[in-house]
Image: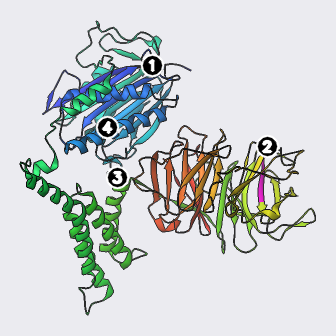
Amino acid sequence: MTEFEALVGFVHVVSGRPLTSPPPGGIAEAAPATCSRGRENDTFIALALPGNGRISSPNFYDQLVQLGSELYFHAEGSGITAGLREAFESLNRDLYEHNLSVGTRYDVHLICGVLRRNELILGRMGEAVAIHHLAHQAKRFPEDFMNPTEMKRVPMGAHPVADIRMTRFTVAEKARLLMGGGALSTLSTENLRTAMQIPDLSLALHELQKDCPAHFALLGVEFLYPETGTPAQVPVHRSSVEKPLSEEATPHPAAFQQPVRRGMAAGLRKTASLMHMGGRVTEQTLGKPATEAESWLSFTTAAIAVFIVPVAVVLLIFLLWFSGTNRSALEICLEDTEKIYQVAQGVQDSDLNAWRTAWEALRDAVEDCDPEGGRDETLDFFRAEAQEKLDILYYVSRKETRVLATIPNARLTDIFLRNNRLFLLDSQGDTQVYHLTLSEDGLSATGKPEPLPFLRGGSQLDGQTVSRIIEIDWSEEALGFGHENVIVGLDEKGMLVDCLITFMSQCQAQQLQRADQWQEPNSLHIWDGRLYILDPPYFQIWRYEPSGGAYHDVPTEYFTGQGIPNIDEAVDFQITSTGDLFILRSDGLLQKYRGGIEQSFGRLAFPRLPNSAAGLFIDESSMDSAIYVADAESRSVLKMSLGGSFIADIRLDHERALADLQDIVVDARQGLIYAISGNSVYVFPNS
C-alpha cells in the first residue's frame, strides 16, 4: 500500500500579531532508527496547547510532545491506538502527579496523530480539535463543534484518568489536516472552504490566518505521494525510514520543523521540577508555615476542606427536607431542589469531594421528586445540569438510542450477533430463542423477532424433549456438531441443540454426559471446537472435547489442583483467540485465567468500577479491540482495553431504557452496541 509524505506548516498568532516562529508544542516526526517493531514506517504528528491552569515555558510543551513521540515509537506491540493510548496515559499520569506534588495546576490540551500508509489515527485530550479535508469535504474531530460535552473534555493533567477520544481517517493524495485548539472551531466555514481550495499549503494557511482570533495556534498537514515532489519552501517529514530532511535546509518562515531529540523523559521531569515548586495550595492560602503550630493549622484547614465540607453539604441537604409544611409535595421538592442547586453552584470544582457530593445530592433529590421526568421544567433543568456535571467527573459518554424490537411478555437474558442477525434468549416461561434480521446499517430491523421452533423449552427433537434453555452460543466449526455455522442452545438437563443458521428448522440434539453432576450452570462458550460450561456453585468450568462430530466423552475440569478459585458469583465468561479465559462476577470483578491458572489482571484508571455486572463481551475483531461489561445497576456499558485500562463509560440519554440490562454484543464493523433490557432490544453508537 502507498506510503504518504506529510507536508507540515503552521499559523501562530499572539495578541493579534502573526509570528514567524512555530507555536510551542508542535511536532512532526518520522520513526527513529530504533523503535518498536511495526512502527518503522509511521509518522507522529502532535500539537500541545496550554490549558486553563498556569502556563509554563514554551520549552515545556516542546518537550512534552517530544516525549509523547518517544513513548509512542517505543510502545510494545504495533497497534496504533494502543501506542497512542499508552503515550496519552503516561503523559497524563506524570503531569497529574506533578500537579499534586507542587500544588499548582498545569494542564494541557493535546492532540496527536499517527500516519501509517493511507490510514491516519487521531487522539485528543481537552479542547484540542482537528479538521480533515478531502475532495471539498471537511470532517471534524469531534464531529460536532457545537457540542459542549465533546468540546470541553478534561485536559491532560487535570484528572488521574486520561480522558482520551480517538478517531480514524482514510488518507488520499492532497488530503489536509488542521490541528489546533478550540479556537479552530471559530473559523468561518466559508473561509475554511476558500483556504482549502488553494493548492499551496503555505498560502492556504496564510488565508486562514486572516480569519483567526487574536490568539491562535494551528498545525497544518498535507499528504502527498512521494513522487509528487515538494515545494522548496516547505520541509517534508516522511512516513518511511528514509533519511529525514537535512537540518541544513532553509524552510519558509511559515513552515514547521522539529529536530529529533532523545532522553526527553528526563528533560520533561527536569522542566517540571523547575515550574514554580513553591506554588503549593496551602502556602498560597496560608503562607509558608514558619512554626509547628502554623503547620498544624495548615493541616487542619486541609482536613476541613477534604472531610468536613462534604459532610456539611450532606447535613444541609438533610435539613432541607424537613423545612416544608402545609405545601404540596411538588412545591416542597421544587423549593428544596432549588436550594440544593444554589449550594452546588457555590461549591468550587477544585474541591472534588464537596463538588461531587453537592451535584449527586441534586441528582438524587430530583429523582425523588420526579422519577420519570417531565413533571416540571425546572426539575428537568436541574436533572440535566446535575447529569452534565457528573458525566464530566466520571467520564460518562452519553448516547442516543433506539428500540430495535420488543417482544411482549418476554424477559431477554442472552444475545449474540451473527451474519447480520441477532439471536435472543427469552427466559420467561418455558424459554424461547428468537432471531431478528438487521438492516444493512444495523440501526433497524427488517421484520419482527421470529421464534426458532426447536430452540424452546418443551419442543420435541429426535425423540427427546428440550427442557428450559439456559444459554445460547454459536459455532463456526463442525468439530462437535453435524454442521458448521450453527446456533447452539443448552438446556438445564444437559441437552445440546444446534440449528443451521441458514435453515433454522434443521436441528440436531445430543445429550452431554455427566450433566447430572452440574449444580447450576449459567453460561456456555465454544472455543477451538471445545465446549465450556460455567457452573459457579460447583466452582468449576466443565470442558467437553469434540469427537466425531459430537461431544461423546465425559467432561474434564478446567480448574484442577489445590488452588480452585471461588467463582460462585460468576455470571458470564468469554475466551479470547489466544486462550485467555475471562470470568465476570456479579460484583463487577473480572478474573483472568490461562490453562486454569489465574493471571494478573487489574482495572486501571477507572473513575468508577462496576458494581452489579450482568454480561460480558470481548471484541478482538477491530482496531479498537476492547472488553465490554454490562453494568446493570448503573445502566451503563463499561469499556476497557484488553489490558484492563479504562476507555469509556457509555450510558444512554434515557437511562431508564436499561433498567433491566442483562447482556450486550458489539458490532465492531458498524460501530454499534446492542443491549437487551426487559423485553426490548436497543442499539446505540459505540464511538
Q: Which residues are magenta?
A: 484-489
Label 4 sits on residue? 94
- Where is residue 682 drawn, in percent x and y? 57, 60
Q: Residue at x 13, y 32 (%)?
A: 16
Report if residue 665 is visible in the image.
no
Q: Amino acid at mark 1?
A: Ser
Question: What's the distance in space between the residues labelled 4 and 1, CA to CA?
Answer: 29 Å
| In this rendering, the label closer to the viewer, 3 or 4 | 4
Q: Residues within 10 Å of mark 1 (few under 14, many from 20)?
A: many
Q: Mark 4 or mark 2, which has the lower sequence index?
A: 4
> Magenta stretch: residue 486 in it?
yes
User: Quadrant of the rendered structure where residue 258 is?
Assistant: top left
**In the depicted structure, whether residue 37 falls above or below residue 376:** above
Label 2 sits on residue? 477
Q: Residues within 10 Å of mark 4 (few under 14, many from 20)?
A: some
- The disc at residue 239 is 1
Q: Do residues under tags 4 and 1 come within 8 Å of each other at their CB atoms? A: no
Question: What's the distance in space between the residues labelled 4 and 2, CA to CA?
Answer: 48 Å
Question: What's the distance in space between the residues labelled 1 and 2, CA to CA?
Answer: 41 Å
Q: Residue at x 81, y 66 (%)?
A: 493
Q: Mark 2 or mark 3, which has the lower sequence index?
A: 3
